[in-house]
Image (spheres, rainbow, N blue to C red):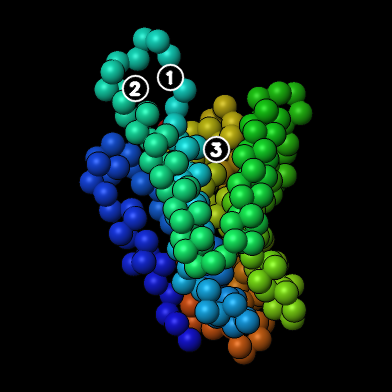
């Protein structure tokens, strides 16, 4: 059974000085990647664990960089314009690596699967953003659930590789991990009095407390789900996930003003 080493394997793609000098590189989606690693290692696709983890991590970084590109205008300074352009190019660079790596591995079907996932992610982001700007904005829990579904979508593409008895556990835990990550992200914004990721208005004390309670509940369910996994899934890779999310809830539970 191969150890989890996606951060080390992706370093040669994320370590370019030109990109790092102009763009803050988002963190890898470590919890989702660890979950994918554990399930692939227990499946008939174990020989693809490394390449699937690398391409998904790089692809998610590319999408996250694009999310951070602020709209420009005619009055912006040249330095700001160049920085924004480099962010776009950096996002394109990371997103394009998955084509190269999967093609080199002969994984043409997975190229198509992840391409569909990218299109779906972008569509759902736009739909949620427009809802948040309009009169039909979802309640906080529905919002977190939709943000989590967006986070999980790339990884749903691996359902086809996990068909069989592992699939229900994979789908259930992927949803819970994404819910935890979405709640952490929004709780981080709430802690600093910032708006929700797809919203406009700052989050208050009541919303921050609701997010904290949501996160604690998701973490409890995640811990129980991991404990109930069959023996062939390496639970050591996943053991600290619920603990980490629970710690994030306790540390980010107060709003700073």
Name the disc covering residue 72, or none.
1
Is 65 located above or below residue 85 in the figure?
below
x%, y% of residue 60? 50, 51
On the rendered structure, is 78 left or right of 144? left
- Using the rendered image of the protein, determine whether residue 250 is visible from the camera's viewpoint: no
**Front-lying residue, 96 or 204:** 96
Which of the 4 image quadrants contains residue 203? top right
Question: How dense is the environment of label 1, judged by Cα within 10 Å: few (below 14), some, or many (20 and up)?
Answer: few
On the rendered structure, is 134 left or right of 195? right
> Circles 2 and 1: CB distance less than 8 Å?
yes
What residue do we see at 57% from left, 27% from top? 201
Question: How far apart are labels 2 and 1 at the CA level?
Answer: 7 Å
What residue do we see at 62% from left, 39% from top? 122
Secondary structure type for disc 2: helix
Q: Which label's residue is closer to the chain start, 2 or 1?
A: 1
Question: How far apart are labels 3 and 2 at the CA level?
Answer: 23 Å
Name the disc covering residue 81, or none.
2
């Amino acid at each position: 059974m191969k150890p989890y080493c996606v951060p080390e394997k992706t370093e040669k793609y994320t370590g370019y000085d030109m990109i790092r000098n102009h763009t803050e590189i988002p963190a890898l989606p470590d919890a989702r990647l660890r979950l994918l690693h554990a399930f692939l290692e227990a499946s008939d696709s174990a020989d693809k664990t490394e390449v699937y983890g690398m391409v998904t991590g790089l692809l998610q970084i590319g999408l996250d960089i694009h999310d951070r590109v602020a709209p420009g205008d005619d009055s912006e300074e040249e330095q700001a314009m160049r920085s924004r352009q480099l962010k776009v190019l950096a996002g394109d660079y990371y997103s394009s690596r998955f084509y190269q790596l999967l093609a080199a591995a002969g994984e043409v079907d997975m190229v198509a699967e992840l391409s569909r996932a990218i299109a779906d992610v972008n569509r759902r982001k736009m739909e949620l953003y427009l809802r948040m700007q309009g009169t039909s904005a979802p309640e906080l829990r529905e919002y977190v659930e939709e943000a989590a579904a967006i986070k999980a979508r790339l990884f749903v593409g691996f359902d086809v590789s996990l068909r069989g008895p592992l699939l229900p556990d994979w789908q259930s835990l992927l949803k819970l991990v994404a819910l935890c990550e979405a709640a952490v992200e929004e709780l981080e914004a709430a802690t600093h009095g910032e708006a929700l990721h797809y919203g406009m208005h700052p989050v208050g004390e009541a919303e921050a407390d609701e997010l904290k309670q949501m996160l604690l509940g998701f973490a409890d369910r995640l811990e129980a789900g991991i404990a109930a996994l069959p023996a062939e899934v390496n639970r050591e890779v996943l053991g600290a996930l619920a603990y980490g999310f629970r710690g994030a809830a306790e540390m980010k539970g107060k709003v700073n003003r």
